[in-house]
Amino acid sequence: MDTSDIEGDLSSILLTEEQIHAKIAEVARQVEIDYAGREPLLVGVLKGAVMVMADFARELRIAAPMDWMAVSSYGSGTKSSGVVRILKDLDADLHGRDVIIVEDIIDSGLTLSWLLANLRGRGAASVEIFALLRKPEAAAVEVDVKYAGFDIPNEFVVGYGLDYAEKYRNLRAIGILAPHVYS
Ligand code: IMP
Ligand code: MG
């Protein structure tokens, strides 16, 4: 759906579909150079990364198999605690593989820093991160994001895979959720 379909639910449009696709193409060109002659395994984190993964994988002009993980972070409210539980694990054996974690957003960075350590512990040759969005707080935790799409303000955003109570994932653009929706 488009922003016009949920008029009133967004306080503003942050990134259009065109801006998102241009950025994904830019990152894909860099990844093609960095991984020339190799076949990186794209690891998507469900469910938020579904849209980024679908567009990024198709944009790549090199072979890049996909695998998926689902994790849930323990914690009260909307802030993650850094304690992560695996709900669905990877199918692939990571031994000797070059892994690129594909994520929708890095907020506190706690989930990704846990994931990074976990995947590195499985004998992968390399593990890097592509996060489409990054919030300023992410800087507070030492997470080395090799491919960062957009640095965005510290607002709750939805669309392009990102949800509020499972809604808005199928919005093409990314927008800032209007406070009246969640208050
Ligand atoms: P963190 O980096 O451990 O704080 O957790 C990041 C996760 O929180 C992301 O993978 C999203 O699922 C969720 N999240 C963080 N910020 C937002 C947002 O603005 N909108 C929707 N989900 C978000
Ligand atoms: Mg996520």
Image (tube, rainbow, N blue to C red):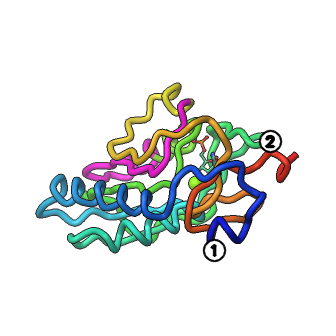
Name above or below for residue 109 compared with residue 88: above
Measure how far apart labels 2 and 1 are at the Cα level.
28 Å
Q: What is the x, y in percent for residue 77? A: 80, 42
Residue at label 2? Answer: 77
Q: Amino acid at mark 2?
A: Gly
Name above or below for residue 167 compared with residue 71: below
User: Is 121 covered by the magenta stretch?
Assistant: yes
Q: Which mark is residue 1?
A: 1
**Residue occupying image coordinates x 31% and y 61%:** 25
Near-viewer residue (31 or 8): 8
**Residue occupying image coordinates x 88% and y 45%:** 183
Mark 2, secondary structure of its residue: loop
**Can residue 121 be seen?**
no
**Residue occupying image coordinates x 33% and y 48%:** 128
Q: Residue 18 appears in which quarter of the rendering?
A: bottom left
User: Is 28 covered by the magenta stretch?
Assistant: no
Disc 2 crowd, CA 10 A, few/some/many (<14, 14-19, 20+): few
**Residue occupying image coordinates x 57% and y 36%:** 153
The quadrant where ligand 2 appears is: bottom right
Mark 1, secondary structure of its residue: loop
Relative placement, left or right, of 56 versus 86 is left
**Disc 2 CB within 8 Å of nearest ligand 1 atom:** no
| Name of the residue lying farthest toward the right | 183
Q: What is the x, y in percent for residue 16? A: 51, 59
Q: Amino acid at mark 1?
A: Met
Near-viewer residue (143 or 12): 12
Q: What is the x, y in percent for residue 118? A: 46, 47
Q: Quadrant of the N terminus?
A: bottom right
The residue stretch that appears in magenta:
116-136
Q: What is the x, y in percent for residue 97? A: 27, 59
- Circle nearer the N terminus (2, 1): 1
